[in-house]
Image (cartoon, rainbow, N blue to C red):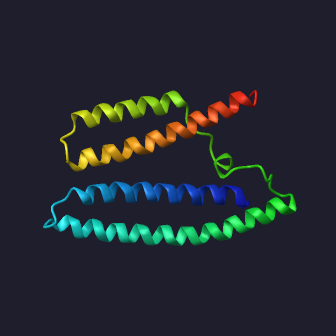
Amino acid sequence: MSIEPELHATSDAVLATLDRLRKLELEKRELPVGSPRLVELAKEIERLATSVLGASDAQVDLAKAAVAGAKAGTIDPGTTIDEMGDPPRDVQTVLAEWRDAERNLADALPGSPEAARLRADIEMLREEYRRAHDAAVRRTAGGE
């Protein structure tokens, strides 16, 4: 396997785990301290944090290999990790999902786990929209 897809996949995995960590942490913050779910969430957060640490170690090795590949000329040194993976989704698709999540949040019970999940989803969609928009601007500027 070439280094590019592995580096991109590892980065995606870290981002997905961090997104999951954020959702769980938001849910945990809204629980009463007497709730048994608090302990369950804390254990799951600990497990996920450990997996991020392991993936981060792998990323160091992959990054070193990528830099070596760029120096050796086997990898284009101007390529970003984002460019190594699948192209971003269409801006309009992401925007539609973001709007749906905002509407669902307006209907959700304030302080509920559903509201916390929706807020985390909105943050992820906001970031995905930014990346998709930036990619579209780069494509337009590059004359594609």
Where, by quadrant of the figure, is residue 35 drawn?
bottom left
- Please state the horizontal and vertical placement of residue 32, each as a whole percent of the image: 15, 61
| Total numbered circles | 0
Quarter of the figure that contains the N terminus: bottom right
Identify the residue at the far left of this view: 34
Identify the residue at the far right of this view: 73
43 to 90, vertically: above or below: below
Please tell me which residue is depicted at 55% across the width and 31% down the height of the picture.
90
- Please state the horizontal and vertical placement of residue 8, each as a whole percent of the image: 63, 55
Please tell me which residue is depicted at 49% across the width and 43% down the height of the picture.
127
Where, by quadrant of the figure, is residue 28 drawn?
bottom left
- Please state the horizontal and vertical placement of residue 97, each as a whole percent of the image: 41, 33
Say whether residue 59 is left or right of residue 118: right
Pick whichever, 141 or 18, lies toward us: 141
Say whether residue 44 is left or right of residue 31: right
71 to 57, vertically: above or below: above
Quarter of the figure that contains the C terminus: top right
Please tell me which residue is depicted at 22% across the width and 56% down the height of the picture.
30
